[in-house]
Amino acid sequence: KEGQRKLFDLGAPVRAKVMFGLLCATKTAATSDPDMCECVRYRLNGLVDIFWNDLTIFVEQMYEDQKDAVLGKAIVDVRELGELGTPPTCLSPSWWRAWVLFHMLPFDTSIFGQIKDPVFWVFTAISIVPGYCIRVAFFLLLLIFIVTGCPADEYQLTAYIIGFKGSQFISSGLIQACIAAVRYYLCVHPGGTHTCDRDGPGADQDIVAGSVDFLGSCILTWVAFLWLPCSDRSAGMRSAVDVEPKSETDEEAGFLERDRRGGCCGSSNYDASRGGRLTGLLGWDVTSFLLSCGLCYFLMYEDTTHLQPEGLPASSPNVNNVLGDVFHWEGHVAIFWARVFYAMLSFPFVIFLIPGLNSVLTHTTPTGYNRNGLCVPFMLRPMPAEKEG
């Protein structure tokens, strides 16, 4: 074991030189255009540096995981990972939690295996239904299931945020915008008449359901963001098996560090670096929500004060009248477009859905849930043996 550990340590300088060489080659290839503006070249170099820092962290995490596996500090058998934890009592709350998480976020199945699971398709369909508070209720339940892991897993929280905002962009953004275009076309009739006050987009939406979808999309995201520092790494640390005992000095230092930084929600410490680059999007989401609220208020203000051309005479603004517009069809339309606008601004989160880029930018290692509801490192099942003859 000691020889293997030293062999891994000897590879660190070589790995650093290789990564630095690749960085220089990448910068040269990206900025070798003689016609490129200097400001563009400078920004491009900065972006490459930022991405390379994330890539270096990801490579080091993978290297440490492989080192732990070779030294026997990590479980590398998919069957053993699947048996970790205590089987929950049938039909108990813990059983339902484990059942949902295993079908939605399995530890041993890729997306190609999940598409063969009809339960996964049912959950996916539910997650993109914006009406009747269905999508928000589903993701609320999923968040409760994730954080009750005590502590919640860092990778699962980042995947939750990305999946939630991605579904918002698709369902409340793209799909709702397409439906709005069709409904606008159908509610305008020949001769200059229209029925958009009854058949237009958002005119007949339930105000409670629309408000829950609008507010829930931001509140649940913020809760998940704020929970990230209290999360733990179930795969990056690979602490499924006992490691070598620490010295008394190391144990004392660990207790001092824990007392100084504190912990929460079952986590041994509070780490603000959890989530990697994804945490920077919290400010973006807050700004997007405030802009959407501003758009909603502006549309209702414009309607109540009759600022549109060729309409009723303009009237003096009144806050009570503006807020009272919520109960009329014009207010329903304003909330509808605020939801669409807020969903469209969730596009930056979609970038994190690119396979491979997620783990690099969030500094996390993939995890999943076994049938006992325990979060363990992600590991595909072995390929079946080929039949001879």
Image: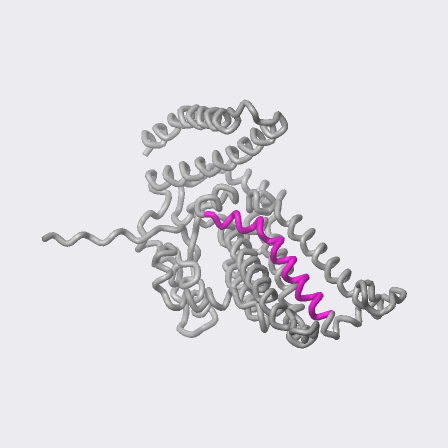
Q: Report the magenta stretch's main SS.
A: helix
Q: Let me know if residue 205 appears in the view.
A: no
Image coordinates of residue 298 in percent, x first then y, are: 77, 60
What span is colored magenta in the figure?
331-354
Q: Residue at x 56, y 50 (%)?
A: 349
Quadrant into which the N terminus falls: top left
Above or below — where is 108 with respect to 118? Answer: above
Q: Residue at x 9, y 53 (%)?
A: 389
Would you say residue 221 sits in the magenta stretch?
Answer: no
238 to the left or right of 216? left
Image coordinates of residue 340 in percent, x first then y, are: 63, 61
| Furthest-front residue in this view | 191
Q: Let me know if residue 191 appears in the view.
A: yes
The way the protein has been coloured in the rendering is one colour
114 to the left or right of 46? left
Image coordinates of residue 191 in percent, x first then y, are: 69, 74
Above or below — where is 189 with respect to 376? Answer: below
Q: Residue at x 58, y 45 (%)?
A: 271
217 to the left or right of 155? right
Q: Nearer the viewer, residue 147 or 353?
A: 353
Q: Nearer the viewer, residue 333 or 277?
A: 333
Would you say residue 341 sits in the magenta stretch?
Answer: yes
Q: Nearer the viewer, residue 208 or 228?
A: 208
